[in-house]
Amino acid sequence: QVQLEESGPGLVKPSQTLSLTCTVSGGSISSGNYYWSWIRQPPGKGLEWIGYIYHSGSAHTNPSLESRVTISVDTSKNQFSLKLSSVTAADTAVYYCARGGTVGDYVGYWGQGTLVTVSS
Amino acid sequence: EIVLTQSPGTLSLSPGERATLSCRASQSVSSSFLAWYQQKPGQAPRLLFYGTSTRVTGIPDRFSGSGSGTDFTLTISRLEPEDFAVYYCQQYGSSPQTFGLGTKVEIK
């Protein structure tokens, strides 16, 4: 059973860079034809897909966030990461890492989510 | 981008009643790549259906998914206490993948 766990600071100052890591257990991030995604949910609101990455390092991001998002993968640690630059209060959300999310692939496994608050 | 409109926003029903949730897409969803998720407070979403109507292992058969093109439906035949939650539809047939804003099924 694949498990995912997000980690990173829960508080980020405006204009700084949000950095999160997702650790995958119960399977290799390099096995199977899976993509690995980041999805976020502002408090009390709906879900927004941020982007995904393949174990090869090929990544794709939501055009609405593309200029600020970097997604990377470290197969040796079975982890993938998210960086979101120039954050504002609008980036306050629960951030989920997940397996799936590319075109043609639903999101089958989710991390428990981590709340990141943007505030000075 | 495909916009998904879910209705109603809130559904107030009693246990044992039937729930019908709608998800309408702004354009046709490719290959019926439509999923439904259930989310309870403080939890991550849980996948219920993918490919419009394929039920995930462990999901009770009182849940059913149907539809095609731009109109999709999630039906819960008889609500159990544990079914009161927020339900989201998601299309993953074209990029960017998008979610609806959700339907909250609450106890009347």
Image: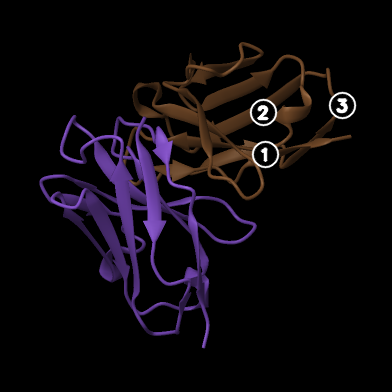
* Category of crowding for the residue at label 2, using alpha-carbon neighbours closer than 10 angstroms: few (below 14), some (14–19), many (at least 20): many
Front tag of 1 and 3: 3
Q: Mark 3 points at which residue?
A: B14
Front tag of 2 and 3: 3
Is residue B3 positioned above or below A94 on the image? above
- Say whether disc 1 or disc 3 marks the residue closer to the N-terminus: 3
- Say whether disc 1 or disc 2 marks the residue closer to the N-terminus: 2
Horizontally, residue B9 falls left or right of residue A10, namely right
The C terminus of chain B: image quadrant: top right
Horizontally, residue B12 falls left or right of residue B3, namely right
The answer for how far apart the CA atoms under marks 1 and 3 are is 16 Å
The answer for how far apart the CA atoms under marks 2 and 3 are is 15 Å
User: Residue A91 location in percent, x, y?
Assistant: 47, 70
The colour one sees for chain A in the rendered image is purple
Answer whether residue A62 is visible to the viewer in this image.
Answer: no
Chain letter, disc 2 residue: B
Is residue B93 positioned above or below A23 on the image? above
Q: Is mark 2 on a helix, strand or loop?
A: strand
- Say whether disc 2 or disc 3 marks the residue closer to the N-terminus: 3
Q: Mark 2 points at which residue?
A: B21
The colour one sees for chain B in the rendered image is brown
